[in-house]
């Protein structure tokens, strides 16, 4: 049930921002407010633990990719890109970032620390496999990935540009891994 609590909090925060209530959460979960308070002492703690849950799941998966010997370097990079936060609906929190900054500043700082470190595994993998890539400035790569992801999680940006998170993240993935030049058939097989 615990994972379900976090997904419901994400859903409620995405729909109502800071205005969701413990009563809303209890109703969604089919339980009582008292039960909710056995897990959390406040709404602030609900949001904080939800952010930890989302990024904890991402980091667990990323670490399993890094530690695995089953996959090639390219397969590992692809797996990192497929494990982006929208899978866990973090965009629901980003959508209400103004409220988060104003009313839950510690949670906002925590979210930013996680977003800034999200690409650590990719950078670590690239640096450990330098012989398999051309020389890459990983500081710039991290900047490109982080800022692109932030824009793809920005509801207004995505709506204004009529792109989806999935299509935007696939475009980012294609550009980062394969560049902007057309590939011939022999390059596509590599």
Image (spheres, rainbow, N blue to C red):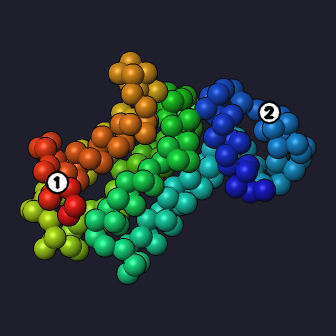
Q: For mark 2, give the secondary structure.
A: helix
> Mark 1, mark 2: which one is toward the viewer?
1
- The answer to which image quadrant residue 118 occupies is bottom left
Q: Residues within 10 Å of mark 1 (few under 14, many from 20)?
A: few
Question: Can see residue 139?
Answer: no
Q: Residue at x 16, y 54 (%)?
A: 185
Would residue 55 appear left or right of 189 to someone viewing this image? right
Q: CA distance from mark 1 to mark 2?
A: 54 Å
What residue is shown with label 1? 185
Of the numbered discs 1 and 2, the one sitting upstream in the chain is: 2
**Residue name at image x 38 percent, y 59 percent:** 80
> What residue is rendered at 15% in x and 57% in y?
187
Please state the horizontal and vertical placement of residue 127, each as a whole percent of the image. Answer: 21, 69
Identity of the residue furthest to the left in this view:
135
Residue 149 in the figure: left or right of residue 54: left
Reading the image, the residue beneath label 2 is 24
Quadrant occupied by the C terminus: bottom left
Q: Nearer the viewer, residue 47 or 128?
A: 128
- How far across and how far down the image is residue 63, in percent? 44, 70
Say left or right for 3 vs 170: right
The numbered disc on residue 159 is: none
In the image, residue 19 above or below residue 4: above
- Residue 144 position within the rendered picture, expressed as x and y whole percent measured from the top left: 24, 44
Helix or strand or loop: what does disc 1 sit on? helix
Q: Position of residue 33 (x, y in %)?
A: 87, 42
Q: Residues within 10 Å of mark 2 (few under 14, many from 20)?
A: some
Residue 50 visible in the current orientation: yes
Of residue 71 and residue 190, the one placed in the foreground of this image is 190
**What residue do we see at 61% from left, 32% from top?**
14
Q: Quadrant of the N terminus?
A: bottom right
| Residue with the most extreme top position | 160
């Amino acid at each position: 049930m615990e994972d379900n609590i976090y997904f419901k909090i994400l859903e409620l925060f995405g729909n109502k921002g800071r205005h969701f209530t413990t009563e809303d959460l209890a109703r969604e979960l089919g339980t009582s407010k008292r039960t909710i308070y056995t897990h959390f002492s406040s709404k602030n703690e609900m949001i904080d633990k939800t952010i930890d849950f989302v990024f904890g799941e991402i980091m667990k998966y990323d670490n399993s990719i890094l530690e695995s010997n089953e996959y090639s370097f390219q397969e590992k990079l692809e797996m990192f890109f497929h494990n982006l936060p929208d899978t866990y609906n973090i965009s629901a929190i980003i959508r209400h970032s103004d409220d988060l900054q104003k009313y839950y500043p510690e949670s906002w700082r925590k979210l930013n620390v996680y977003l800034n470190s999200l690409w650590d595994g990719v950078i670590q993998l690239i640096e450990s496999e330098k012989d398999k890539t051309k020389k890459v400035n990983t500081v710039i790569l991290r900047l490109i990935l982080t800022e692109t992801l932030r824009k793809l999680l920005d509801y207004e940006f995505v709506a204004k540009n009529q792109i989806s998170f999935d299509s935007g993240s696939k475009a980012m993935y294609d550009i980062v891994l394969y560049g902007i030049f057309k590939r011939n058939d022999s390059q596509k097989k590599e």
